[in-house]
Amino acid sequence: MKATLRDVAERSGFSITTVSHVLNDVPGKRIAPDTRETIRRVADELAYRPNQLAQGLRRQRSGTIGFLADSILTTPHAHKVISGAQDAAAEAGSMLLLVSTDGRPELEERGITAFLDRQVDGIVYAATYHRIVTPPPSLRARPAVLLDARTDAAEYPSAVPDEVGSARTAVAELVRAGHRRIGYLGNVDDIPATAGRLAGYRQALAEAGLPWQPAWEVAEASESTGGYRAARAVLDRPDRPTALFCFNDRMALGAYFAVQDLGLAVALDVSIIGFDDQEIISEGVHPGLTTMRLPHYEMGQWGIRTLLSLIDAPSDGPYDPVHFDCPLVRRASVGSPRG
Amino acid sequence: MKATLRDVAERSGFSITTVSHVLNDVPGKRIAPDTRETIRRVADELAYRPNQLAQGLRRQRSGTIGFLADSILTTPHAHKVISGAQDAAAEAGSMLLLVSTDGRPELEERGITAFLDRQVDGIVYAATYHRIVTPPPSLRARPAVLLDARTDAAEYPSAVPDEVGSARTAVAELVRAGHRRIGYLGNVDDIPATAGRLAGYRQALAEAGLPWQPAWEVAEASESTGGYRAARAVLDRPDRPTALFCFNDRMALGAYFAVQDLGLAVALDVSIIGFDDQEIISEGVHPGLTTMRLPHYEMGQWGIRTLLSLIDAPSDGPYDPVHFDCPLVRRASVGSPRG
DNA sequence: ATCGGCCGCCAAAACGTTTTGGTCCATCCG
DNA sequence: CGGATGGACCAAAACGTTTTGGCGGCCGAT
């Protein structure tokens, strides 16, 4: 069915060796230009494509990268990292073998051994949100990088969002719009983003010389209903803020409902900035939500690229986590304060 | 590094052949029980795992399935199909090679050839929403199935949601709650779901002996703002419906905003049912949205299973599309009509 | 004429399996 | 005692590549 190297060799009248040399452009081999020409033509005619299994077996390079995601289910924006990874892999002639563990840790080990059985060139270990992880030791068997995750030991290259910097640019945007009373609807999870975004909020306030009010800073469960409660807690006060920075878009969605329940209008009465840019919310909501976009696509690309260079030139760490900026996505939820 | 068959052979004192026979349990081979025992022990000690590249090369079965998704980006619920596929694949000792074309059709061909280069056992061609597709001819090179998609020629097995049946159960749920004036916020896209869900709506009305009002049936762009406009158009009327069935959750989200803008309350004044169960909306919204869940996970599973059986026993179609029911997910957006 | 060197090409081993077709040695039967 | 039977194992080919280490032939120099 599919043409093999032998087919090309027989049809062109040269040996398999020579055909291989020509098709791979092996340097330092002297082969007559005519021969090259012929072989290439025949290969073309037969639509020859090297069998990557055979190639991988011989070269010890399968052209395949294992992508282990702790979940592609839960957080809808996380597949952008896969997209970025895939594009970067395609650029280099590689492909992704995908395993999603969906929070079932026993699948991690199994996934990794399945990767190793298939002789992947390297492994991407991707979390769905910025986390400190302890990957199974089997991950050491091959070059690996961490995405949206890092270990304490810094034994793998890793990429994470710059939580505090991004929070600062969010708050700075509100300041720029003229707000002087800015609240923070924070979360209660024990994850790096929690402290990071809170710190960024405070720093931005301090930099702008704005007042800081403990009552404007409230922590709740990081989803819609939590956002609703948090927003009510802050907005029901007499000295209520004119702007809210929210831990994520889900909380921001809750804040929208709270604002409306109070008979107020988003942007006009209360400006809101979210985090994550989950388009289904940020574009679905009325008015559109200004938010910080997580650089997932870029992190995916970065992951594969550093992984590939690590494969070509192994090295031993430790590796400082690389911090990625989150760009501000302006929509319509930020206005100037009234009066 | 990794133990090979030869290592096991040498360490156990038997030939590679015998080791292979034992480890694969090839039927009809007479091998002394002691020998089996020894070989298995040694294989265990060395943590031997067969190299799938070599195995695939020899057996012409790579243990790998190509998954071509037209987009894992756009629709956030679509990765459940990947999850289902992956789980079914894992059950059978297979893995997924993933390519997402993200609406770039030139990637389809490239993806498929990359699959073929890697000798995938079969290919899943998955759309993000129920569509009629024309896959590139190269797809014929291997067994393939279509998910959330079908061709006119029915040349591949395919799975799609049962649009009209699901719409009927949605409307029936509203009828059961006591509603007699039920509106439909429809869409304007040229896709199978458009006609299907509309037809289901009308059928359900007819079955229940309820009045049908052209004015209660409005079509708009199938996202949040479209839903908002559609809901306003219907609810601003004096004979406004007490319940709305929406083409999808995004439109339902818009309907929520419309209801609130009118000073009404979802469930109390206007019951709402959506479609898709995009959790970020259906769980994020206040009150929680009752909606139809697309059976993506199940379709993914089905896809791999039928693909695998197709690989083992090739056959030639034509294949009627298999229709999957969408289960109703009850939350809090449906109440009984007032008074 | 002979030798060295270069040019153009190729045989064969290797990667790690599976599978075909044996071989060797007891034992059993007549 | 010869041949057949069967039990237990193995050598080697094959899958489709890459890569090492050649090997002939021609040319120029001696």
Image: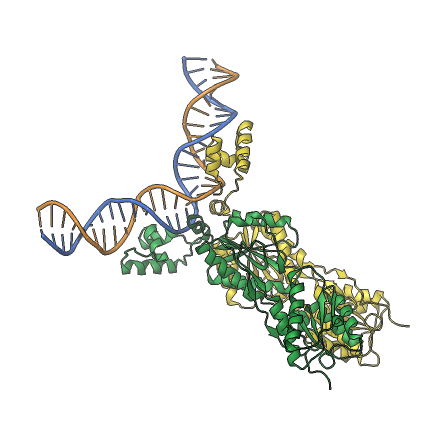
Chain colours: A yellow, B green, C blue, D orange
Q: Is residue A135 visible?
A: no
* Position of residue A112 measured from the top left corner of the image (x, y, whole percent): 51, 60
**As drawn, A120 above or below B322:** above
Q: Is residue B259 left or right of residue A74?
A: right
Q: Residue furthest bottom?
A: B339
Left/right placement of residue A199 relative to residue A132 reads right
Q: Residue furthest right?
A: A339
* Depth check, front residue: A176 or A285: A285
The percent position of residue A203, horizontal first and vertical second, equals 77, 68
Label count reads 0
Who is closer to the viewer here, A137 or A187?
A: A187
Which residue is more in the foreground, A273 or A144? A273
Give percent across and percent down for residue B68: 58, 55
Q: Answer with left or right where residue B317 lies relative to residue B336.
A: left
Q: Quadrant of residue A330?
A: bottom right
User: Which quadrant: the C terminus of chain A?
Assistant: bottom right
Residue A233 x %, y %:
76, 80
| Visible residue check, residue B78 | yes
Based on the displayed image, in which of its 4 quarters is residue A299 positioned? bottom right
